[in-house]
Image (spheres, grey):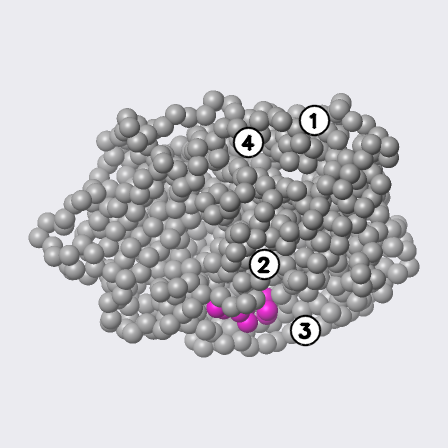
Amino acid sequence: MRLVSNLPCATKEEDHVTIAMSDGVRLSARIWRPTSSDEEPVPAVLEYIPYRKRDLTAVRDSIHHPYIAGHGYACVRVDLRGTGESEGVLTDEYLEGEQSDAEEVLAWLAEQPWCDGTTGMMGISWGAFAALQVAARRPPSLRAIVIASFTDDRYADDMHYMGGALLSDNLAEAGTMFAYATCPPDPAVVGERWRDMWHERLENARPWVLEWLRHQRRDDYWRHASVCEDYRAVRCPVLASSGWADGYSNAVTRLLGHLDVPRKGLIGPWSHKYPHLGEPGPAIGYLQEVVRWWDHWLKGVDNGVMDGPMLRTWMQDSVPPSTSYEERPGRWVSEPQWPSPNVEPVAHPLTHHRIGDPGDTPPGQEPHGAALTVQSPLSVGQFAGKWASYNAPPDLPYDQREEDGGSLVFDTEALTERVEILGSPSVELELSVSEPVAMVAARLSDVAPDGRATRVTYGLLNLTHRDAIGTPEPLEPGRRYRARVQLNGVAQAFPPGHRIRLSLSTSYWPLAWPPPKPVLLSVYEGASTLTLPVRRDRDRGRSSEDEPQRPFGEPEGTPPIATTRLTPPEQRWDVKRDLVGYRSELEIVKDAGTQRFDDIGLDVGRRAYERYTAVADDFTSVGGESTWTMRFHRDGWETRVVTSTVLRCGETEFTVDATLDGYEGDRRVFSRNWNETLPRDCL
């Protein structure tokens, strides 16, 4: 990244500004703005998240907020109620109160003497959710948003559930927020009130996973703040981005297809990171694009920001399987609109372990022919990687050949020419199952001539949700059903000599929670198809015209704040198999070590530990654990929060055991345990 210090505007920073809400709670803000804004007001840009602006996101914030401020904007970073130095408590995500607070913050910004009354919102992940959700509420000052790594559908396309199947990230993210929402404020900012504020958070905390497991169907809990319920509610321009390695790879194209406001989309090869910090690379000059967006929509500059294609995306070339990549080879391609005229759905029949050519009829088979069967072991999924990759620790899917051993596999013949896909593949299956609750995991892989298989994309379907995602009905064993499995969106090129592989399994642990019992799945050849979104020029039968080789500038940002590394980080992703007791285990360690924030003299440590276990093929033996330790230290002040959330299951229920402990120095000052059982609902 090119670090830039010489910007068009000199700026100043206000480290802690309080914004009073209508109920008296005060939120804490950090503001970067041009020094000239005292006399010449500027638009304000809000990033609104719960991740502690003073320390945990301070390095990242220092790269982009001063950069944008240096181009003539007041950048305002606000911690949600109950986080950082903001008063109150945070008990769940995207609540009504969170969004009404955001509206009050925007109104406050618009009234400040250094703001010209115009505002925007930006963010990644939670911050992008917040911006999109608040945009649907149409606050009067909000003129545009910039969002990265987000979803418009909280039930069907978030870390909680996929295709009605429960994701293990539901537990992992619940553990993350259980820890983040119980951290203390900094007494250097709030003074002696810090202890009362902290204990208010501790006393009101509950394991977040409990609420998320109470809503296993698509009910009003998930409909709230899901913009897909009414796309017409969003009336401001939207610049949306994501990455193909991210869990949120689908929402950008959905917004492009459904919104009727000015909009642009950008999808790179990245994991869950801002595009200017994108991993795997190449990262891009994203902040330059953001500034151009704000210049046009907040300042009225005629800079052609809406010229060119609606969507730019990175067409990924073939790579060997790896759990981490520094760079993904490929090229930028563009689409004039979405759905694109350059992308055509091509249906391929599934025959006896073969993906046929379009229009093929299986030799000697009737349309509802013979059944191909599979009953997958619980080991299928151990090399699946994370639902939402951060590319650290290495968390991308590894070689799929071991996974394929417990799956029903269909291959094309070796390709004679390059095939490119862009969009969401799907699988239409005629099937029957042996149990009333069953799932299908569908994986699309790029198989090299030497046999190595790189997963390209995948999708899950809890078959009780076959008619409508979110409204399950048990299956009748032995009865034939038709079901459609939607795979995640992707842009991928398959070279000549390679094969395209579809793999179907009845478990995918630990990425997704398995059904209560092993399931025998029968798929009927001749009546099942794989549909690929093939990208090509409509007139000439070849890849359509591509972007310039470098349509974006080099990544830029302002120099990050100074920190000192006190203890090294640790990252591990270990798969273990005990062939005596038949116990399988995935162990994940994400330890950021201890880092001193030099400007405030604060030492901060974070350690996350996840473990997912199973015994043999006992589907009720699976369990997950998420444990976090958060440490804060300054001379005369030392606190620690330790949270643990353990999720287990039987055939009819889930069991949650959780603990929360708070320490001052070595003395435990707070402790609480939870043990709750919740019913499984067709899950």
Pointer 4 local density, CA inside 10 Å: few below 14, some 14–19, many at least 20: some
Pointer 2 local density, CA inside 10 Å: few below 14, some 14–19, many at least 20: many
Label 1 or label 4, whichever comes before in sequence order? 1
Between the residue at mark 3 and the residue at mark 1, the CA separation in whole angstroms equals 47 Å
Q: Does the magenta stretch include residue 533?
A: no
Identify residue type, mark 4: Met
Q: Nearer the viewer, residue 148 or 104?
A: 104
Identify residue type, mark 2: Ala
Helix, strand or loop under label 1: strand
> Which quadrant of the rendered structure holds the C terminus?
bottom left
Identify residue type, mark 1: Leu
Q: Give the range drawn in magenta.
A: 209-217
- Above or below, 524 against 323 in this view is below
> Which quadrant of the rendered structure holds the N terminus?
top right
Image location (x, y in percent) of residue 191: 90, 56
> Which residue appears at 25% of the width and 60% of the height?
430
Label 3 or label 1, whichever comes before in sequence order? 1
Q: Indicate which label's residue lies in the foreground, 4 or 3.
A: 4
Describe residue 13's horizontal placement relative to residue 100 as left or right. right
The residue where tag 3 is placed is 673
> Which residue appears at 57% of the width and 53% of the height?
233
The residue where tag 1 is placed is 3
The residue where tag 2 is placed is 225
